[in-house]
Amino acid sequence: MTSALLRNIAAQDFAEYRGRVTRLSGARIEADGPLSRLGDYCEIETATGDDVLAEVVVVEPERLILMPLAASSAVSLGGRVVASQRFSRFIVGDGLANRALDALGRPIDGQADPADVESIERRSVLAAALDRVTPDRRITTGLRAIDMLLPIGEGQRIGIFAASGVGKTSLVEQLSRQIECDHVILCLVGERGREVEALWSGHRDKPAGAATTIVAATSDESASMRVRAVEQALAMAEHWRGKGRHVVLFIDSVTRLALALREVGLAAGEPPTLRALTPNVFSALPKIVERCGAIRGGGAITAIFTVLSETDDVDDPIVELMKSLLDGHVILSRRLAEKVHFPAIDVGSSVSRLASHLLDGDALDLSRQVQTILAEYAEARTMVESGIYRKGSSAAIDRAIEIIPLLNEFLRQPASEHADPGAATRQLRALLVDGPTHG
Ligand SMILES: Nc1ncnc2c1ncn2[C@@H]1O[C@H](COP(=O)(O)OP(=O)(O)O)[C@@H](O)[C@H]1O
Ligand SMILES: [Mg+2]
């Protein structure tokens, strides 16, 4: 009898699932409950009847600090705070292929709620560990500059670095339409609504290619939503990778993600450090990169991150961090963009750490020849462009001067052109062997 009673008591749940708003200041809301863990979601009841969803960013013995995910002006002191089961989970599954979603998994493509989805605990995906393998299979992107000279491997993590307006988003758009894989996930963080719309219509109307999912949190949405968009996109990518599929995940842009993380960090009381960024920025980005990649036994997430790099001379901590984390850098150059050379990929400055793994002997040889010519030219550029260089002084520079215009012609490519790698290899070989005579 006693033991039955004790068992009964032990089975009871005495946790407090409700709290009240105790303080409001700027973007943060304090409450005296419910009992929560970091990263949990709560709904805050308001007088207007529209509950405000908020994320728990600080847990202390007597108080919680929450970051609202939407406009919070309707929240008032004493408002009830209730733990939200639904939004402490992500949705994943095949029903999300060819859909556009917000950071909470709600459709933004004008169609009904996705069917054929499961939900998974946010906490469980954030903790997963991986048995990763080095990429050894080249992906075809249909972009000559990349396929021939800066090849991307299945499961590789690469960055596209450029100043603003040089073509990061445009390159992401072209790659996402053409790249060979099972699923494309376009995670758009802090873009303008108009850009999201344009990207989505480009995918909706494309004749062929991989199933595409857009997860977007635009610039007018809260910092928590912008961070969550990336988590939702990663959860989907990991789900499909777990089924043995090849997912290409684009995150545009990591810089805006870092700014959103900083906003969350500041609200949680973290101290601003380098360039006013908070420590959580430097711990979150490596984890995001680590979660991508190819795993033993099949399935891969190839990740392509865009990073804003405004100037070449000042060290930008986000640029430095991402370069150290990623195994390939595609650098876009304003100089090329100004010459209407698109995609504005500066092949000489870009790095493909896996080129020797991914290209076969012949293609690797061609790519090395091109890199040598570009390096020769880069050294002599100032002399050549200022007219000081005299033809005949160096056979290597003479050859570079002849080949470079042809090479630029080869590397320029309209956004609508899908280049066949076989044909591109033949073109490149002809260009290097025959030189200007056949140009
Ligand atoms: N492949 C391309 N072909 C033609 N124009 C391009 C191309 N890529 C970029 N541009 C031009 O550059 C502008 C800015 O590109 P965008 O991709 O938005 O840059 P970012 O994302 O780096 O700010 C575009 O509006 C377009 O005018
Ligand atoms: Mg952009």
Image: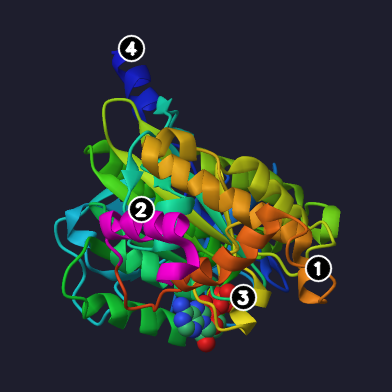
- In this rendering, which labeled residue sits more in front, label 4 or label 1? 1
Q: Which residue is mark 3?
A: 336
The image shows residue 187, relative to residue 169, as above or below, that is above
Q: Which residue is mark 4?
A: 3
Please tell me which residue lies in front, 313 or 387: 387
The answer to whether the beta carbon of the residue marked 4 is less than 8 Å from any atom of ligand 2 is no
Local secondary structure at mark 1: loop
Inter-mark Cα distance, 2 to 3: 27 Å
Q: Which residue occupies the extreme front position in the image? A: 392
Please tell me which residue lies in front, 381 or 430: 430
Q: Which residue is mark 2?
A: 248
Query: Of the residues shown, which amino acid type is indicated by label 3?
Result: Leu
- Could you tell me residue 372's position as x and y percent? 61, 48
Horizontal side, residue 84 vs residue 69: left or right: left
The image shows residue 288, relative to residue 227, as above or below, that is above
Q: Which residue is mark 1?
A: 389
Please tell me which residue lies in front, 36 or 387: 387
- In this rendering, which labeled residue sits more in front, label 1 or label 2? 1
- Could you tell me residue 127's position as x and y percent? 47, 34
- In this rendering, which labeled residue sits more in front, label 3 or label 1? 1
Horizontal side, residue 270 vs residue 300: left or right: right
